[in-house]
Amino acid sequence: MNAIKKNIYYKILAVAVIFIFFALVAPLCAPNDPLHTDFEHVLEKPGENYLLGTDQVGRCVLSRILYGARVSLGMTFSLLGMVFIFGVGIGTVAGMSGKVVDSFITRLIDVILSFPEIVFAIGIVGIIGPGIKNTIFALSIIWWTKYARLTRVLVISIKNSEYLAAARMAGAGTLRCVFKYILPNIVSPLAVQFVLDIGNIMLALAGLSFLGLGVQPPIPEWGNMLNEGRAYLQTAPWLLLYPGLAIFLTVSLFNVLGDMTRDFLDIKNI
Amino acid sequence: MKKYILTRMVHLLIVMFVVSFFTFAMVYIAPGDPAELLLSAHDTIPTSEVLEKTRTEMGLDDSFIIQFGRWLKGVLHGDLGTSYVSGEAVWDRVIPRLGMSIKLAVTAFILLVGISFPLGFLSAVFKSKPVDHTIRIISFLEISVPTFWLGLILIYTFTVKFQWFKIMDQQSVKSVVLPAFTLAVPLIGRYTRIIRAAILDEYSKNYVLGERSRGAGELSILLRNVLPNSILGILTLLGLSVALLLGGTVIVENIFSWQGLGSLALQSVTYRDYPVLQSYVLLMSIIYVNVNFVVDVVTIILDPRLREEN
Amino acid sequence: MKRNSLVLYAIIMIMIINIAFVGAGCQKDDSNQAGLGEGETSNSNINSSEDKNLNMAIFWLDPNIEPTEGWNGWTLTRCGIGENLIQIDENLNVKPVVAESYAEVDEKTYVFNIRENVKFQNGKNVTADSCKQSIERALLLTDREDVKFNLDSIDAEGQMLTIKLVDEFDPDSGMKLSKNEYHWSGEIGIDTVDVKYVQDGTTRAMMLQSGEIDFAPQIETNDLRLFKDDDRYVVLKGANLRVFLLRLNMEKPYMQSKEFRQALAYGIDKQTYADNIVHGINAKGPFNSMLPFGSSGEDVHEYSPEKAKELLDDAGIVDTDGDGIRELDGENIILKYYSRTNHGAGANNIGIAMQSQYKDIGIGLEVFQVENYSDIAKKGEFDLLWERWTSAPSGDPQYFFDASYKTGSAGNFGNYSNSKFDEICDKLNDATEKQEREQLGIEGAKLLVEDVASLFMYYQEGNVVVSSEIDGVHRFISEIYYIDERLGFKNQ
């Protein structure tokens, strides 16, 4: 990666960080309470009173989008954080253990991956009921396997290397090997996978909310805002335009970041 | 090779068995008494005797394993249980819907192959030219766009504004185009990139240099070596795309009021109609693992290297 | 209208029953045409230019069209599959249909003269006897207590009733109908009708725009402007007899407190909802003010969050743990608000608005729009249940009272019980004078409002949007008819 590209990468990284920061402080920059219904201004066009207009019960679209960012990012990162830690943990165990444990874990992952992910998530949510926590739970059950699988392969490749044999000879125990020698060496590809997944998970969660299975009204979230705005496709297009753009741009941002992280860390084939 | 395929078949059977097991267990642990849920489908408020009788009839007092066995036997005979809502056989309701979903997914797959191959190919051949840049930007946008948003925009543009398509028409050949395209878009972006990368990767291999030095034409290298060799890897990945296609049908069916299995599953979620939901998960997963099995086998047959290994 | 209103009451009964009669005609036949009626339906060759096909959408379709079940009779009359002996026409006048005329012999005896030339779709004659059988069958089978009436005897002469099938029926997508070639009114202007079941109002609007349908009822108010100034469409709109209300579930401990219920009424700004959210008319009670016994005047519980808070404080329902939500017996009061998907966006939006206003007075509200609405209604899993009622389809109050608020009645999902109100229902049973019945209607309505048996939200304007190529469409105030024998294409 040349200097110019690096420069761009840092800039995009900065944008992403600023974006996450803004999402966290949404309550401070939102002009209005996202749940407040202003009946004098129902379905008002974007303009002076409300920068991005109001919805069918007079709520400020801009404020809802800003709060929605927090909900969206919050859900995405808590889900990713969970599956990352769990997946890497299980993957490491599988990679380091003997044949029995390893093949059990591998088979388990195989079975879970036999379900198309959204189909599986709908099945789980259908049984435990819609809602933020349940949706996150449903997606985590399937998503950790990706990290476990990747980690396992990476761990095994290092386990059999001369590098680790040397460490072992120097008297390092298994735990020490894992934390001191293995994990630091496989963190780059895992990080790339992590960043690349942000966009995917965001879309999956927004999609489930759009279907009414994820975030429940009145909590503002981009997916459910689109769902509520559907009925006004023709008469109040701003209800669809802005939340849709919000998802589109955010996912694009993190996808660019993912692509560039991959180039930056020079990792192939993820 | 025969041995390998046989092993894969055994493996497939095991996976299907375990998948059914998980699907059954999922509903088994679901809250609510199936006997009561079923009876309330018939609009009666059951007495405890009736409830008890139904429970016995349904075999709900048996152990988990016996119930699973009975259920599995039913599934193999085309019996997916009784809907809690309509009281009808789930099979009759689900199969026509599945047909609609498959129609959607297959069309989307054709679009996916038909669009992403030429794009990825062009992008690789004209690497770092304007064509490449344009295609890469488009495919990047395709990956990032939420299908549910895109679908709504497409409906508005092409049915309301231009009136090229109908909204509720499910019969004509034309009707499937818009939903299938929506379903395919994110995958088109993804595969355009994958195909581009695969072709470029193949180009970077030593034998290409060898061919060149032997004086082979670029076109001949491309058609004789690069394409055939890269297609195998892409094929495997296409198999995986089926998961995204099958999962994506729910959203697309919802937006386009498409009478497929996904929209039925969504309905069954609001009705807590577990047998229908269960059939949805089961059928979709079975299709998915079978498609991947076929892809595996085809890859083996096509790939000379793997063939030799076995 | 000088007629004794009991007659009208009986008429509404007979109407529904007779939907049954024709509908029965639609149920069990093996032949390939629709029941009696200005019915229509499809051929497979829809695209042939000869075929005069109408595409219409409806917003309600149950799993079957057996007229004795639920509200299916309305589907039959709406799509012209079935006809009544007599009906209330678009101007609220009695119109003879299958019966050429009728007479009231005494208070409890009616004689209907069936037209000579009425035939079922299969060409069989509709006779007095087939009407009799239909009514008897309906009374025997119906699952709706509210439409049953006491039948002393019914006499007829005639032949066997034969039964017919609609061309195609699918509870998910709709049905295809073809015309009754032997209709008593003569040649019908339309050969086939494609009835599409489209729950979502926005989708119905888009289908009109894309040209897929020529006729759709109940377009969302916001979408109406898309058709208003467009000469490709005709918008028929105006008042109807429909009221939207929120039924309260009296089984819940807090609902038993009248103060609490009053607070619920004071806590919402219905006037603004009606004006700004749903563009309807603020409801003052269960009956539209167009009716002689309709509710008018001041709102009994005009929006006043202060009064609401005061009432709640007085009732001892206060917030003790400081989370902004009041409690009863230590439990936060979070109400569940349910509407059905095909109640439309308005039902949900009012829920959202109420959620925000109830928050101000310290009451939680969860808003759900669901498919399994009837399940929730029957099981009483709601606190507030959105309902859409044509509260006086026959111009008489008794039907709504009996069906919906009388102790133990089938539609009384909230188990409302008030002995004074039951007395009024009993009096209505015996009252025969129109004026007396209207007075009882006014009293009953007042009682329901003051006792907050339900929150009566608003009256909606009804609408029907039709392609301007279609002729002979009338908007019925009752909205239990959409198309009838007058339908046709303009240029033909």
Image (tube, coloured by chain):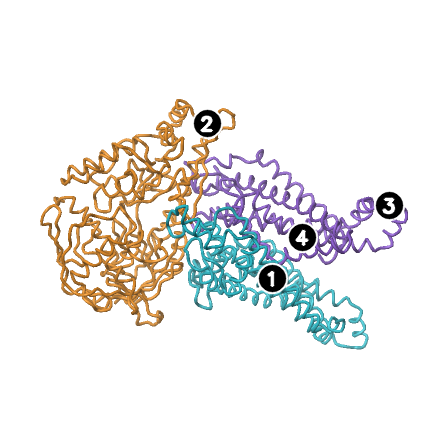
Chain colours: A purple, B cyan, C orange
Between marks 1 and 3 in the image, the one whose residue lies nearer the viewer: 1
- Nearer the observer: mark 4 or 2; the answer is 2
Q: Nearer the viewer, residue B248 or B290?
A: B290
Would you say B101 lies left or right of C223 here? Answer: right
Residue A145: mark: 4
Quarter assignment of residue C337 = top left
**Image coords of residue A219 (percent x, y):** 52, 40
> For the residues marked 1 and 3, what is the alpha-carbon distance in whole angstroms?
43 Å
Q: Is residue A235 left or right of residue A207?
A: left
Tell me the tag on residue A172. 3
Identified by mark 2, the residue type is: Asp
C73 lies left or right of B271: left
- Crowd band around label 1 with a 10 angstrom C-alpha radius: few (<14), some (14–19), many (20+): many
Neighbours of disc 4 within 10 Å: few (<14), some (14-19), many (20+): many
* Marks 4 and 1, how far apart at CA: 19 Å
Q: Amino acid at mark 4?
A: Thr
Spatial CA distance of label 4 from label 2 is: 46 Å
Q: How many labels, in total?
A: 4
Mark 2 to mark 3 CA distance (whole Å): 62 Å
Amino acid type at image mark 3: Ala
Q: Chain of mark 4?
A: A
Q: Pick the quarter of the image with the C terminus of chain A.
A: bottom right
Residue at coordinates 23% horizontally, 61% vertically from top-left? C485
Q: Position of residue A233 (x, y in %)?
A: 45, 51
| Helix, strand or loop status at disc 4 | helix
Check disc 2 and report the residue beneath it: C329
**Residue at disc 2, secondary structure:** loop
* Res B122 seen here: no
Can residue B250 be spotted in the picture?
Answer: yes
Name the spot of residue C5 as percent of width and height, x first. 16, 44
Identify residue for label 1. Answer: B16
